[in-house]
């Protein structure tokens, strides 16, 4: 463990997803005063600091997906030595489908303070403007690139009742929407949010099938897709269905405990009932 009196602080700093005037007021001060800035793209950082009218006094270190694993120990040592390390990504909050998780996990394990400069988020912005239910939602990040893996991921979400938020690359948006239409139904309500907060911001709202046809002409810019959840239904008590759902959750990476809890929530039945079904099935083999 690290001596908290001598260790530094890791600051996760949210950056604008579009207009620089959306930058939180504290961002400029943190960047100007940081001992170290870990940036996903140092060129974008330079443009950002220029737009903010500041000149960082600290050291700038590149920290992106390609070197994240190798550079995390270096940054951890700087934190142990007492440096204030500010982590920024190209847009939005670090570690949300961006570099940062490894460093946060390492810092927490080492007993180092982790804090943040709250900033814009494409996830929440898209959700808010989508016009879809916002009382319960889940963030699914980027879908797998390979069609088979993407289809399996979406099949596992077909009965998800919460509104879902996805990130997608513009050149894969048509394929993603078409796969969603197959998995969720062509009429499932959705919104494609493009270039949020930027000059050419566009929010297209329609059924998934119609949105896939619209995207066939090609789209540009940063894309966030919001999809309404499956209609709530009555309790599901078919044993074979419940056991199959648990198996699907486990294939997607959930632990047996988490899979049982999720299926119980989705089916509207007690967790103990699902637990008994799964373990009785296993014992019968």
Image (tube, rainbow, N blue to C red):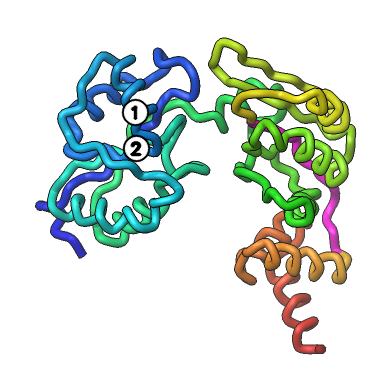
- Residue at 17% across / 34% down in the picture? 58
40 on left or right of 216: left
42 on left or right of 265: left
- Label pair 2/1, CB-CB below 8 angstroms: yes
- Residue at 13% across / 49% down in the picture? 82
- Residue at 39% across / 31% down in the picture? 14
Question: Vertically, is 67 above or below 20?
Answer: below
Q: Based on the picture, tell me whether residue 236 belongs to the magenta stretch.
A: yes
| Secondary structure mainly formed by the magenta segment | loop
Question: Residue 180 at x, y = what percent?
Answer: 80, 41
| CA distance for labels 2 and 1 | 7 Å
Q: Farthest residue toward the left?
A: 6
Q: Farthest residue toward the top?
A: 199
Q: Based on the picture, tell me whether residue 41 belongs to the magenta stretch.
A: no
Q: What range of the chain is rendered magenta?
A: 224-237
Q: Which mark is residue 71?
A: none
N-terminal of the two: label 2 or label 1? Answer: 2
Question: Residue 165 at x, y = what percent?
Answer: 65, 37
Residue 271 lies in quadrant = bottom right
SS type, badge 2: strand
SS type, badge 1: helix
Q: Which residue is mark 2?
A: 39
9 on left or right of 121: left
Label 2 neighbour load within 10 Å: few <14, some 14-19, many 20+: many
Question: Vertically, is 21 above or below 281?
Answer: above
Q: Which residue is mark 1?
A: 45
Number of callouts: 2
Label 1 neighbour load within 10 Å: few <14, some 14-19, many 20+: many
Using the rendered image of the protein, determine whether residue 166 is visible from the camera's viewpoint.
yes
Using the rendered image of the protein, determine whether residue 136 is visible from the camera's viewpoint.
no
Q: Nearer the viewer, residue 13 or 262?
A: 13
């Amino acid at each position: 463990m690290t001596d908290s009196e001598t260790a530094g602080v890791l600051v996760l700093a949210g950056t604008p997803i579009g207009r620089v005037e959306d930058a939180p007021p504290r961002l400029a001060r943190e960047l100007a005063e940081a001992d170290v800035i870990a940036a996903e793209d140092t060129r974008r950082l330079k443009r950002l600091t220029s737009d903010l009218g500041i000149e960082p006094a600290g050291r700038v270190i590149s920290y992106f997906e390609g070197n994240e694993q190798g550079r995390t120990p270096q940054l951890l040592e700087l934190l142990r030595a007492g440096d204030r390390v500010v982590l920024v990504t190209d847009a939005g909050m670090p570690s949300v489908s961006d570099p940062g998780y490894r460093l946060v996990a390492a810092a927490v394990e080492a007993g180092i303070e982790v804090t943040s400069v709250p900033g814009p988020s494409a996830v929440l912005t898209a959700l808010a403007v989508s016009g879809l239910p916002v009382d319960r939602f889940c963030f699914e990040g980027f879908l797998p690139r390979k069609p088979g893996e993407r289809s399996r991921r979406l099949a596992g979400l077909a009965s998800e009742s919460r509104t879902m938020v996805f990130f997608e690359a513009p050149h894969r948006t048509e394929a993603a929407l078409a796969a969603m239409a197959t998995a969720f139904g062509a009429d499932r309500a959705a919104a494609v949010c493009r270039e949020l907060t930027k000059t050419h911001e566009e929010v297209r709202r329609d059924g998934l099938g119609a949105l896939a046809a619209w995207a066939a002409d090609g789209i540009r810019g940063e894309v966030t897709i919001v999809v309404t959840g499956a209609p709530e239904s009555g309790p599901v008590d078919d044993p074979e269905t419940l056991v199959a759902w648990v198996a699907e959750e486990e294939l997607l990476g959930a632990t047996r405990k988490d899979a049982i809890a999720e299926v119980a929530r989705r089916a509207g039945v007690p967790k103990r009932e699902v637990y008994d079904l799964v373990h009785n099935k296993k014992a019968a083999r």
